[in-house]
Every structure is written in structure tokens, then in C-alpha cells.
Amino acid sequence: MLTTFATFVGLLAVATLSRALVGPDDAPYIAAYMGAAAVLIFAAPESPLSQPWPVMAGHLLSAAVGVTCRSWIPDVLLASVSAVALAVLVMQVFRCLHPPGGAAAMVAVLGGPSIHELGYVYVLAPVGLNALILLGLALAINNAIPGRRYPAG
């Protein structure tokens, strides 16, 4: 029950922030991959994919890869698949594999106009800020649940 509550609170916070930053039309793109991150962080907090380094670095690096692919590859299909593939490579190199990061990379390419207009700012806000919000809530809520310890140690 607390996991469900944590997921709701976390997603409400990031969805509200995303709507303020990119508007109501493009906020659902961001809420989708943050939803996947929330599932990992709150329902599987012991997973290596849910730890703070993969969550933060996986999102930030992947978002930067996505913006770069959108800027350099004119074909949207090629840019989007390249963004995810290269994000996986970068996350592996930096040991921060976090599957929702791949979606953050893809949204940088496929997202709407307000996301595209952000350019590399997209990496910090909304992506980085949302990941930071989820991590803060994960630390507070997961550690309040008896028998849980986050980050896993």
C-alpha cells in the first residue's frame, strides 16, 4: 500500500513540474518515462537499476544523447532509434543502466515542440529535476517503510 502511495505522490510531483515546464501537451511524454522510473524506485528499490547513480546519471546522460541525436540526425526514425541505442552504450560505459533513461533519450527526439525548444536545457529541467524529485521521495518514503533500506547497500 505504501508503494502505491509513494508512486502516486512521486508521479504527481513530476507530472505537475513537467506540465509547468513544457505545457500540458508535452508533459505526458515525460510523465511516461518517469512512471517507469517510479515503478523501479518504489516497487523494486533493491534493484541495481533503482539505485541513485543509475537513476540520476542514466536519465541525464541519456537525455543529453537524445538531444544530440535530434540535433545531428535529420531523419526522426533514425534519430530516435540511435538515441536509445547510444544511450544504452553510454549508460553501460558509465555503469548507470536505468531503462527509463532510454525513454528519456527517445522523448528528446519524438517529443513535441516545447520539448524540442528546450534543447539541452531538457537534460536539466525537466529530466534532471524530475529524477532528483523522485530520488528525494524514494529516500524519504522507502526508508520509512519497515524492512526497506534505500539506497540498497
Image (spheres, grey):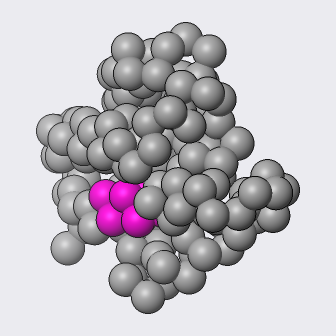
Along the viewing direction, whichever of 124 and 146 lies nearer the viewer: 124
Q: Residue at x 55, y 11 (%)?
A: 24
Q: In the picture provided, is 99 more to the left or to the right than 136?
A: right
Along the viewing direction, whichever of 132 and 9 lies nearer the viewer: 132
Q: Residue furthest bottom?
A: 93
Would you say residue 69 is visible in this rendering?
yes
Q: Quadrant of residue 146?
A: top left
Q: In the picture provided, is 30 more to the left or to the right than 11?
A: right
Asked if the stretch drawn in magenta spans residue 116, the answer is: no
Q: Main secondary structure of the magenta part?
A: helix
Q: Residue at x 44, y 60 (%)?
A: 64
Would you say residue 101 is visible in this rendering?
no
Expressed as whole percent of the image width and height from the top left, the position of residue 114 reads 54, 25
- Quarter of the N terminus within the rendering: top left
Question: Which stretch did the figure color magenta?
Answer: 56-62
Along the viewing direction, whichever of 4 and 109 lies nearer the viewer: 109
Q: Is residue 103 above or below residue 127?
A: below
Q: Residue at x 44, y 36 (%)?
A: 118
Q: Quadrant of residue 93?
A: bottom left
Q: In the picture provided, is 94 more to the left or to the right than 70?
A: left
Asked if the stretch drawn in magenta spans residue 58, the answer is: yes
Along the viewing direction, whichever of 62 and 49 lies nearer the viewer: 62
- Quarter of the C terminus within the rendering: bottom left
Expressed as whole percent of the image width and height from the top left, the position of residue 91 reads 46, 76
Q: Residue at x 64, y 36 (%)?
A: 111
Expressed as whole percent of the image width and height from the top left, the position of residue 5 reads 38, 23
Q: Quadrant of residue 70?
A: bottom right
Q: How many marks?
A: 0
